[in-house]
Every structure is written in C-alpha cells, then in structure tokens.
Image: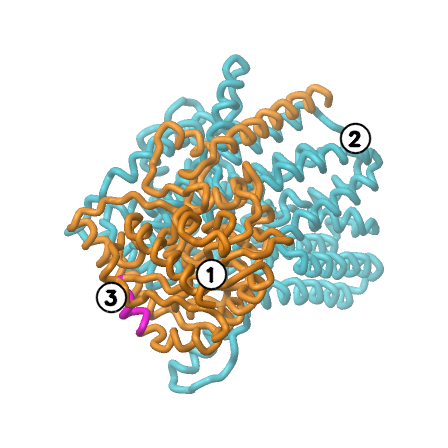
Chain colours: A orange, B cyan
Amino acid sequence: MKRFIIKISFLIIAITTTYILLGFLADGTTDPFYLRFTSPKQKSLILGTSRAAQGVRPEILDSVIDKKILNHSIYNFAFTILHSPYGETYYKTIKSKLGENSFNGLFILSVDPWSISQKTNLNYDIESKKELSKLTFFNMNPNYDYLINSYKNSMFNLLINKFNRDSTLLLHKNGWLEVNINMEKDELRKRTLSKIEVYKENGKKYKISDKRIFWLDKTIRLLKKHGRVILVRIPVNKEILAIENELCENFDSIINTRFNNLLYLNYKEDSNNYTFVDGNHLYKASGKIFSKKLANDINNLFFNE
Amino acid sequence: MLFNSIEFLIFLPIVFLLYWFVFKKLSIQNVLILIASYVFYGWWDWRFLSLIILSTVVDYILGLQLKKTTEKKQRKRLLIISLVFNLGLLGFFKYYNFFIDNWIEAWEAIGVTMHASSLNIILPVGISFYTFQTLSYTIDVYREKLEPTKNFIAFASFVAFFPQLVAGPIERATNLLPQFYKKREFNYDFAVSGMKLILWGLVKKVVIADSCAVLVNRIFENHQDESGLALCMGAIYFAFQIYCDFSGYSDIAIGTSRLFGFKLMRNFNYPYFSRDIAEFWRRWHISLSTWFRDYLYIPLGGSRGSLKIKIRNVFVIFLVSGFWHGANWTFIIWGGLNALFFLPLLIGGKNRKNLNEVAATSILPSFKEILQILGTFTITTFAWIFFRATSLTQAVEYIQNIFNFNNFIPDVIRHKKIIPFLVLFVIMEWFSRRQEYAIVLDKKYRIVFYMLFAFMILYYASVDEKSSFIYFQF
C-alpha cells in the first residue's frame, strides 16, 4: 500500500504541478475571454456583445472622458452574441465583476436587436451552455477555474502559444479585444458577404425576447446602484442594419419607451464614417475614432445634465 | 461526474484514502461506497438520484418477498412487478416521446389528426444500465440462482457502484453483489493493474475517441458536401470513436473498481479483430450481449427449435438491443442490420466457428484471416452509419453520397493527423490481443510509455462537448 501511495502521489503531484505552471502562461492570446476573468473587480464597465468588445476602447474613454465623470479606468466586459446577450448568465457575471461598494461608476451598455433576442429553436438560453455559465471565480489570476472548466483547448496549448503566437485575436488587459485581420479589399468583401449571410440566417432564427428585455432592465437597475448608465447602439454597415431592422423595426422605440429615463446614444446611421472588419464589427482604427466620439458625446451629455 | 474531468481527479483519491485508511470496517466501507456513488451521480443532477433509490428499494423488497414465498404464481407476480416497474421507468424516461410521436405519425398517415403532447423529458444518465442491473438481481433471485440479500447497504451499493453506474459494464448480481459481503484486501498488483487500465482507458478516450469525434462530427454534419472517400473515412473514424470511447470508459470503470478491491467483468475483447459478426458480438459490449442472451434470448428458446424460431429469436435480440440504445429508428435499423449480417452464419450453423484466438499460433494473421477481419469490420462500420446518424434520412443520404464518384477524392490534409494514431493504435491492440489490455509492457521501458501516455492525455484533454462519453446518452 505504501509503495502504491508513494507512486500515485508522485503522479498526482506531477500532474498538479504541470497544470499550475501552465496556468501562468495564459495571456491575451489564450482566447478572446480569459484575461477578463483575471482582472480585479471593476468600478466602471463597457457591456454588450462582440461589437462592444471590439469597437469600444477603454483607453480612449479614459483619456477623453472628463475626470468628473470618470475618475478611474473603465473596463471592457463585453463578450459575444452567444455568450453575453442580456440574460441571467450575463447578469450574474456582471454582478461578480462589480466591486460591491463601488460608486460613481460609468456603465456603457451596447444594445441592438440581437442582444435582446432569443433563438426560437432552442428551449434554453444559448449562453447557459457557454463559458460564462460554467465559472465560479471571475476575478482570479491565474484563473484555474476558467482554464479547467471553460478553456476549450488543452492547457498545453498555453505553452505552444508561447512559441507560436497568433495575434489575430489579442485581448488587452483593459478588456478590449483587438482583431488583426487582412483588410485588403477582396478579403474584406468576402468576409462581409459571409457575415451578411450568417446574419440573414440568424434573422430567421432569432426573435425579440421579453425575457431578455426583463434581464436588461434588471441589469440596468443593478448598475444604477453603482453609477451612471448609458445605452449605446454601435454602428454597423447598411446591409447588417437592414437585417436588424427586419428583425426588429421598432427597436429604438422599444428602448426609448422601456428605458425612457436613460441616456440612449444611437449611432446606427453613422456607418459611412467607419470601416468594419466584416460589416458587423468596427475595425480597430475605426474603433478608436468611434470611442473618441462616444467619449465626447458622454462629456457633452453630462455637462448638459 | 466525468472520468475525464478534474472533479473526478480530486474525488477518486479522496474516496480511495477514506476507503483504505479511515473506514477499514467492511460495513462502513460499503456505506462510503454508497455515499460516494450518490455524490458521483448527483454531481450531474441530484434530482435523479431519487430514481436510483426508488429502483433500489423496489427490487430489494421484491427480492425479500421472493424468498418468503414458494408459490409459483405469487413468485411470478413479484417478478412481473419488477419487470413492469423497471421497464416502465426506462420506458417512460427513454421512449415516451418516441411512442407518442410515432403514434401521431401513424394516424396522420391515414388522414386522422391526433392531439397528444410530447413531454420535455430529460433522460436520466445511466438509467438503461442500472435498471438492467437491478432487473438481473430480481430475475436471478426468481430463478433461485441467487440468494436475496438482507443487507440493504450492500444491495444499494451494488446498484449504484460509481465506477460502472452510468455506462456499465452491466454487472450481474451473481458476480458483483457477493463482493460487497466479503472483506476486501488491498492488493498492490491488482491496484496497479487497475491504474494501468485507467491510463489506457483515458488514452483511448481522450486521445483517440475525442480526436476522431472532431472529424466525425464535421463529416456527418456536412455529409451532403463531403466527398465519397471522406464519408467512408468518416464512418471508419466513427467505428474507432465509438470503440475507443466506450471501451475506454469500461477500462476506466474496471480499473477504478480494482482500486477498491472489486473485480468487474470484461466488456470488450478486441472486437475489431473478429473474423465474423458472431465473433464480433461475443467481443463487443459483452456485458449487454450476455445480458440479452441470458435473460431474453435463452428464455425465447435461443438457438433451439426450428429455423423459423431461431431467426425470430436473432431478430428479437438484435432489434431489442438496437432499441435499448435509444428511442430512434436509426438504432432499430442498426440492430436489424446486425441481425441480417448474423443470419447466414446462423442458417449455415457457422455462428460458433471462430471461438479460438485469431492468429493463435502466429504473429500475423493469415491472408484469409485478414480478409475475414476486414470483411467483418466493413459490415459493422456500415451499420455504424445508422447508429451515428441523427435520422434515417441522414443515414440514407450519407450512404448515397459515398457512391458519388464525381466527387470522391477528399481533402487529405485534415486526415493526416489522425491516421498515424489509428494505425499505431491498431498495431498496439494487435500485439496485445491475448492480454487483458494493450499496455502490458516490458519493465525496462514501460515508465517511458506511461509518461508518454500521461503527457498525451494532458495534451489532448479539453472541455469541449466532445469530451462527454457517447454511452451517457443511452
């Protein structure tokens, strides 16, 4: 028995040590989410789906927004349409990321028809089977909870990543997701067409959901206890916008009616001013311009309050 | 709890240490096994523990009642209660919607609109396995092959024994239950063999089955756009996936039980080296095949009686076996196909021809044996297409597209990674075919292999959907 225990202990210690060491190799190239669960609790957040994750740059907001409005760093805590539509999962995740005793925060919530829609062919919330729903610890570095339960690859990939860095998707420490992708005309057109097809298909499968609107409302009420809340509609290209309008023509009036006491910055008609990586997400340079505009508009809004 | 999860990696050593170092008394060890088994199962969904407990209580009481009475009618009645209860439980949770949907479709086919609602029933993990296990107990008590137990904890532990609770092997009460009465002694060699089985089972599951799963899922989902050869490869990959997934699970289950001093029955015996379909079924999912043989096939008359009776019995056992796997016509067709493959052997009296070891006296198989093995593998793989397909339509389309010779050559790049693994795996299995498992290695270099296997498991381990065991859905 003693011999067996010694051998097995050696094996368990070897495996555990390997996993612990591998955890220290995780970084912004690990996947598009990991780093967001390694940062401490936050006072101010950018929330929403991948449009916000890629299109709103916290460092720009930090530098442009007046210190009376935002006197600390804002953090991008937006994920994707599959992971963070407004719902119970995202609500709980946001709650875990918020400092309990934080006040005077700024919360920018990106909204669009997809973020409050539900897939009609599913009898469950799509995000309930994804990474966010599996987590217990949201602010731990290294976050072994995430690496063990949510990271899709083997942890040895973290080691391989060190030698074979792929910076196509690079998650920054402030939560902004940088996308480095071929922007040549032909490639861009191909990607855009493919994305339009995807969204056309999605348009057939999604429907505005009262449940999601309820959770958006609940999320707003939670955030209001911690600071100011602003709703933002991030621009997309005209074809994608047309699909969105088909999905929910009266989206803006739903928002204006339901959340009439909130500031709603609607940039849906501004697509001509920006470049998109696929029609749906702002290119990083455009994200910079958009973030600057958003920050200036926030300054104007609050000074005119 | 999954065997290939971190939770299990923590759970197993804790139970092991408590079992051997803290609770040394037999009765307490049984209580520990029972609690551990309920925790193991409850980790998935504690609500369904009530079904296991209910099934345990019912069959325990029926067993005792059977002992009390010698009257034939009364004994038969008790047996029927057990059959109705267990099969009713299984039927409701597994087949309710299947029957309702088919009932409605049948009426609609003759122009009658029916209104019946399907229920959103969750299939409790392992229900097909533990109901068969408790049934085997009651049937054996009824047949007076087994003395009914008064020890409820031992019986409950036998029903819920965590290594084999959710995906077998389906143990007979005659084999496993008596092991709960006897003091278990720690045996180093036995425990080491258990660890080797766990290691090899994980290699099969994590490295081979899960790697095949990625390609299989892609090929089956896009079967309309895939080339003919890619579809052939997809079916072959699935044959490896299901074998490595399921036999991997069985190895881990058998290995884990050895750590606690229990010996479970063997569930797989190198089935893909079978020379005919009858031999395949003697080597594949042995615990289920023998369960059907003993409790269904033989009571029906087995291979005695007229040719008509024999054929009927073969079809019954294979169709029921198919249906046991799931409430879908694909499984029934899969069972039916296997029955069809079996028939020529039965009619020709050749179904027990290959009882000896393949290439028993040589290193390599003869040319004839190679052809027989390849032939058997081809027909089983063909039948696997139905098993894997989500619907009969998909299975038929899949098979039709294999013969699309305008688009036959696949994109070879994605197959490059997996084929060397499969070749290596087949070679390892071949040279181990007389052993219990494929990693009985020479002392000199075995540590290198163990390290390599452990590294491969860690390297390939992931938390994707594919990492769940296929047989959890049955």
The magenta segment is A237-245
Residue type of the residue flagged with mark 1: Ile
Residue type of the residue flagged with mark 3: Lys
Quarter of the image for residue B50 reads bottom right
- Determine crowd level at label 3: few under 14, some 14-19, many 20+ residues with C-alpha closer than 10 A: some
Helix, strand, or loop for circle 3? helix
Q: Are marks 1 and 2 on the same chain?
A: no
The image shows residue B333, relative to residue A208, as above or below, that is: above
Q: CA distance from mark 1 to mark 2?
A: 45 Å
The nearer-to-camera label among 3 and 2 is 3
- Pointer 3 or 1: first along the chain: 1
User: Which subunit holds the residue at mark 3?
Assistant: A
* Residue B425 relative to residue A287: left or right: right
Residue B328 is a magenta residue: no
Q: Are marks 3 and 1 on the same chain?
A: yes
Q: Are marks 3 and 2 on the same chain?
A: no
The x, y position of residue B163, in whole percent, is 64, 42
User: Which subunit holds the residue at mark 1?
Assistant: A
- Comparing B374 with A93, the one in front is A93
The x, y position of residue B192, in whole percent, is 63, 25
The residue singled out by tag 3 in the image is: A238
The residue singled out by tag 1 in the image is: A126
Q: CA distance from mark 3 to mark 2?
A: 70 Å
* Residue A191 relative to residue B449: left or right: left
Q: Residue drawn at (30%, 53%), measured in percent from left and top?
A: A289
The x, y position of residue B232, in whole percent, is 29, 46
- Find residue B21 and name its label: 2
Helix, strand, or loop for circle 2? helix
Q: Residue drawn at (52%, 78%), measured in percent from left and top?
A: B117
The image shows residue B343, relative to residue B89, as above or below, that is: above
- Determine crowd level at label 2: few under 14, some 14-19, many 20+ residues with C-alpha closer than 10 A: few
